[in-house]
Image (cartoon, helix red, strand yellow):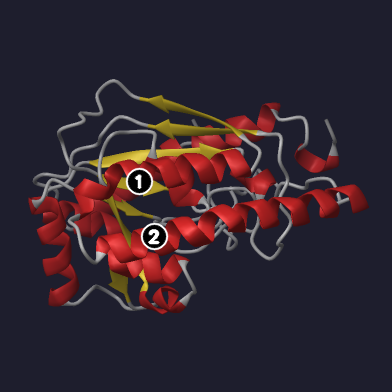
Amino acid sequence: MNAGRPSGDDGVAADLPPVVLPEARPVDKLVAAGLWGVGLSWLVPMLSTMTVAHKLLPGRELEPLNRLYCWGQLKLLGVRWRAEVHPDVDPAQPYMFAQNHTNHFDHVALYNATSHYKQGIELKKHFDYPFYGWFMKARGTIGVDKGKGGQSPEVMAQMRAEVARGHSILGFPEGTRTRTGRVGPFRKGLFFIARDLGLPVCPVAVTGMYEVMRKGSPLLRPGGVVTVHVGPPLPTAGLSDDEVPALAEQVREVVAGHVDRYWERHPTANGRRV
């Protein structure tokens, strides 16, 4: 656990450097091009089908298709996937899943770790992205405005409606993808929302995805192991406004602890190649 370590302006714990991975070789770039080709051949028809289907059917009826898409996308990234879920996570209880943010495949990595129907929170501008954005909007993803301090009554009403259906909410409290491999500071808004919705918060740490794809680079690297760690639910009921920031920091410590321990034992960190 990394409790009590101060963070720098870039969100990296002060005594931990950014992760440095090996430079891409020509063969790595060729492999990445092939992965993008086969990945898009799966993504485009699957998301197109689900975009149309979500306009015709309720979300839960399409859950097998959602899970098939996530399974297939991970397979085509060339990774081995596994999940470690705390036994206190109740399949019948909606949660706020608070996940570290690494790349565009984060929701794919988490989704099949638990049986919960997870409705995401997404910047509204992302709904304009071809296929992915169209699918997310059709699925009912909760659109928010960038940089807005607090959300509108309409957004909160949409979240309450999702919870009333028994759905969980998936959010990324860092607010942006990591550029360092480490877990950045957590914004507090997601935790106030969880408290207001009456949702316990499940910390989610995904390791192995930073090597697969990093912000600022289209390179895909196959062959690794992606592990989803779903921690024990933390209650929010009865928290005052003054107590919510401590909850956010507690969740961050759990998530960052998994990520930092992963890099301590990982052979590719700091430029070493397996």
x then y, percent, for residue 170: 32, 52
Please give the name of the residue rendered at 84% of the width and 42% of the height, measured from the top-left corner: 271
In the visual, does 233 lie left or right of 206?
A: left
Please give the name of the residue rendered at 92% of the width and 53% of the height, measured from the top-left corner: 26
Residue 49, numbered circle: 2
Relative to 216, say whether 60 is above or below: above
Q: Residue furthest right?
A: 26
Note whether residue 266 is visible. yes
Please give the name of the residue rendered at 50% of the width and 53% of the height, measured from the top-left corner: 101
Which residue is the site of mark 1?
A: 65
Q: Are marks 2 and 1 in contact (CB under 8 Å)?
A: yes
x then y, percent, for residue 190: 29, 58
Tell me which label, 2 or 1, sits earlier in the chain.
2
Q: For this rendering, which residue is in front, 16 or 156?
A: 156
Quadrant where the C terminus sits is top right
Q: For this rendering, which residue is in front, 174 or 71?
A: 71
Please give the name of the residue rendered at 66% of the width and 46% of the height, measured from the top-left corner: 212
x then y, percent, for residue 102: 55, 52
Crowding around mark 1 (Cα neighbors within 10 Å: few <14, some 14 to 19, many 20+) is some
Residue 214, numbered circle: none
Relative to 273, say whether 197 is above or below: below
Crowding around mark 2 (Cα neighbors within 10 Å: few <14, some 14 to 19, many 20+) is some
Which amino acid, mark 2? Thr
> What is the CA distance from the residue labelled 2 to the residue labelled 1?
10 Å
Q: For this rendering, which residue is in front, 58 or 108?
A: 58
Q: Which secondary structure lies at badge 2?
A: helix
In the visual, does 121 lie left or right of 133?
A: left
Which amino acid, mark 1? Leu
x then y, percent, for residue 172: 40, 56
In the visual, does 28 lie left or right of 9?
A: right
Q: Residue furthest top?
A: 87
